[in-house]
Image: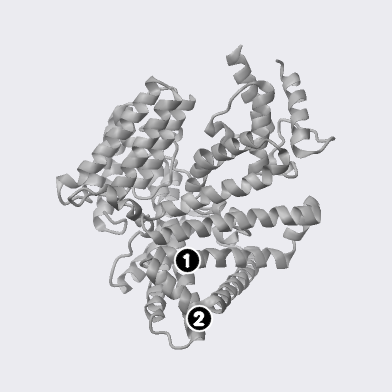
Amino acid sequence: MSLTSPTFFAFLAATIVAYHLSASVSYRRLVLGAANAVFIGSYLSNVTEVLPLLAFLLLGYIAVMLVHARRSGRVLGLGIAAVLVSFIFLKRFSFFEPLGSLPFPYLLIGLSYILFRILHLIIDVRSGDLEQPVGPLAFFRYTCNFLTFVSGPIQRYQEFSASDGVEQAPLDANRVYAAFSRMATGYVKFVIIAATAEYAFTYFSQQLDHAAGPSKLVVLYAAASSTYMIHLYFNFAGYMDIVIGAGHLLGQALPENFDKPFLSRSFLEFWQRWHMTLSQWFKFYLFNPLLMALMSLFPAPALTAYLGVVAFFVTFMVMGVWHGTTAVFVVYGLLMGVGASVNKIWQIGCTSKLGKKGYRALTEKVWYIYGARGVTIAFFVLAFTCLWIPGLPQLLSLVQRLGVVGLGGGFAMIALLFAIGALVTDGVVKRIGGLSVAGLGEGLFVRNAVLAGKLMSIVAIASLFHKAPDFVYKAF
Amino acid sequence: MTSPQIYEKLTGIFRDVFFEDDLSISPETTADDVDGWDSLTHIRLVLEVSKAFGVNFTASEIGSLKNVGEFAELIEKKLQAKA
């Protein structure tokens, strides 16, 4: 069920109306559970397509229950291993082809996010963070919540449970307006900005193969990879606005997943602002335990920074590889690992050379801020090539055609463009911010006019495109 | 162990981890207030606290601590549960 389809609007409206027909918690949970089933069902053309997902959920639930019954390290390890092996098998990672595959098509959407939720449950039940047993229906509502099913945000069970059919705050006109406004903003990002960027990306990327001359290739590549970045961000951020807004109408406070990533001044800061719930998940369940284990093995405080480099590398490598099932995603994982490590080494080097205060002073200089923002975004723009290029041979061929000079030139061009763009945007925002819309105020007329304007723009622009935009992150 | 005793012990650990002999902490102290309190030193701090107080922290506890006050409260809770 596409987020831009009339079916989705009808489904969402029906779910919201049904949810508010009664304040009974058990009734509302029933509505949410049924909505999840209908949402998943919309992706199926045959009942057998859902069987692997059901088996995966059942395995996950058994693992959670076993860990709850016997909180031993061995059961925890076995549970995690069983869930991971099943995930790898079902996702058909190309490196594990000898494992074989199921001989029929089946639903893969949502599987990665269900994995995160199941692993979180298993680990938190073992640690005692989750003491109450999780019922099978609550497990289904949590792991298959239709709002977060396709691509997050990754909510922790503790937060989900607090609003599972329980009204946190009664809906009033302001809350309903805020929810609709958030959803409309999401559709503006999704249907207008991301879709326009996608058109531009398609235009530039299609010319890459026939680019005559190295300079034209570099310019086309810079344009294609930059527009892909813009497309990816607005597509994903728009999706988040839509589900977070819809969540408010269903009493759910879903966690935020973006915090202005284009303001990032370093690789590590970028991941604190981009897909935040994924970064936090990896921090909680991979980076922190791994670093603790390394520090326990090598307790010398002088080694802290170097152990950190190792932990950052491993964490970002795994996070990168998670994005896909083919060899090109290993390159992506490596790039993420290298980016995190270089960032940490840079921090260590600058701090030891300039001192903590000197390094902080350096990072506050205007040229450093915009330079760092440009370089950070340029790194991700180039690394994200792995997300849109069809495979490793095509990536290698592109890199070969660009050469070291072409790649360096492309990097510099993108960094400069984004740095200047950031400088200009900040200047404009500062000036416009000073003028503000104070004269118009926040009255009923203005806010409704703004909402109507967004809706009209969505309809107008959507009618110009011949196809409805699709959600790009569902592929990962 | 009383709250002042916990803070006294915690102050010593903070000074050792951040190599600052005159570092003082309060319940409101956050990572932004202490030079060098990043994700790496945070884990070093948690390990030292675990060792000094004989308590363990879960993944979400380690990741969700917002200030020293929360840290001290958590230690106190764990010490009470142990007693």
Q: Report x, y in % for residue A452.
A: 40, 61
Q: Residue furthest front?
A: A98
Q: Quadrant of the image for the C terminus of chain A?
A: bottom left
Please give the label number shown on residue A229: 1
| B83 relative to A24 in the view: left or right | right
Establish if B72 lies above or below A382: above
* Visible residue check, residue A175: yes
Residue A291 vs residue A370, the one in the foreground: A291
For the residue carrying disc 2, how many other residues have a C-alpha within 10 Å: few (<14), some (14-19), or many (20+)?
some
Res A122 → quadrant: top left
Labels 1 and 2: the sequence-earlier one: 2
Residue displayed at 59% across by 36% down = A292
Q: Provide the chain ID for the residue under circle 1.
A: A
Q: Report x, y in % for residue A370.
A: 66, 66
- What's the amino acid at mark 2? Val
Q: Provide the chain ID for the residue under circle 2.
A: A
- What's the amino acid at mark 1? Met
| A409 relative to A202 in the view: left or right | right
Residue displayed at 69% across by 43% down = A303
Callout 2 secondary element: helix
Callout 1 secondary element: helix
Looking at the rendered image, the disc whose residue lies closer to the viewer, 1 or 2, is: 2
Residue A175 vs residue A245, the one in the foreground: A245
For the residue carrying disc 1, how many other residues have a C-alpha within 10 Å: few (<14), some (14-19), or many (20+)?
many
Residue displayed at 59% across by 63% down = A376
* Visible residue check, residue A22: no
- Give the total number of marks visible in the rendering: 2
- For the residues beneath circles 1 and 2, the answer to whether they share a chain is yes
Q: Report x, y in % for residue A22.
A: 29, 32
Q: Report x, y in % for residue A232.
A: 43, 62
Please give the label number shown on residue B77: none
Query: What residue is disc 2 on?
Result: A219
